[in-house]
Amino acid sequence: TRPKKIAIVAMGISAPVFLKEMFGRRLSGDHFDEVWAINRGVRAVVHDKLFVMDDLRWLRKKKDKNYARMLALHDKPIITSTAYPEFPMAVPYPFDAVMEFIGDDVFAHNTVAYATAYAMSIGVHEVNFYGCDFVYPDGRMAEDGAQAVSYLLGMFKGLGMIHGLPNATALINAN
């Protein structure tokens, strides 16, 4: 698909903002062309695509069998590192095409960064980020990938793309 306006929704601290905004947008008719959930957002977010860049077989064998079972039964496209037949909705991430488009390998092993770069490569005009926070208010926890996503958001601006961030996020020090 080639959506023009999307939401990327992870499960960070600003994710509830998405739920509040979606309620109002659906009522007003102003909504996203697509919603892309990140990883375990599959359980909480109504979405059009799911991004899970962890190896799905590894998830099943080593990490979380219940989560992997849910992914095997999922009914929407799962953009992932490697597609396996036991995950029928899995679609391989187009690494070469995306890296050629952005001219860099800045993914930092982070699913939000992969989804962001993919959005750029397919010509999405506006990306709104929810739950993609990386740094949490108490300062005790931070996730890798914030720098990669911030770098890609700088590229967004240079390409004339728009990114939206909720007030509750720490991404690019928005809050």
Image: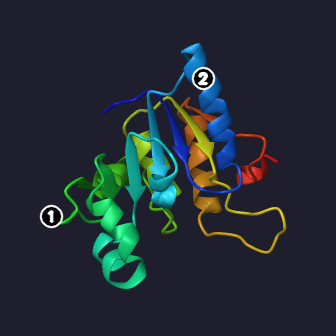
Q: In this view, does 68 lie to the left or right of 125?
A: left
Instruction: Give the labeled residue for mark 1.
Output: 85
Q: Where is residue 6 in the image (x, y as percent from the top left)?
A: 49, 34
Above/below status of 143 relative to 48: below
Number of marks drawn? 2
The amino acid beneath tag 1 is: Pro
Q: Is residue 157 above or below residue 148?
A: above
Q: Residue at x 73, y 63 (%)?
A: 135
Q: Quadrant of the N terminus?
A: top left
- Specify the quadrant of the image occupied by residue 128: top right
- 10 Å neighbourhood of mark 1: few (<14), some, or many (≥20)? few
Q: Is residue 172 left or right of residue 130?
A: right
First in sequence: mark 2 vs mark 1: 2
- Kindly identify which residue carries mark 2: 25
Residue at the top extreme? 28
Determine the CA span between mark 2 and mark 1.
37 Å
Q: What element carries label 2?
A: helix
Nearer to me, 143 or 50: 50
> Looking at the image, what colour scheme do you see?
rainbow
Q: What element carries label 1?
A: loop
For residue 140, side relative to residue 124 (left or right): right
Q: In this view, does 24 lie above or below 6?
A: above
Q: Where is residue 140 in the image (x, y as percent from the top left)?
A: 79, 75
Instruction: For label 2, count other residues whose C-alpha is less than 10 Å away and answer few (under 14), some (14-19) or many (20+).
Output: few
Residue at 70% x, 49% y is 14
The residue depicted at 52 percent of the width and 67 percent of the height is 108
Q: Residue at x 60, y 14 (%)?
A: 28
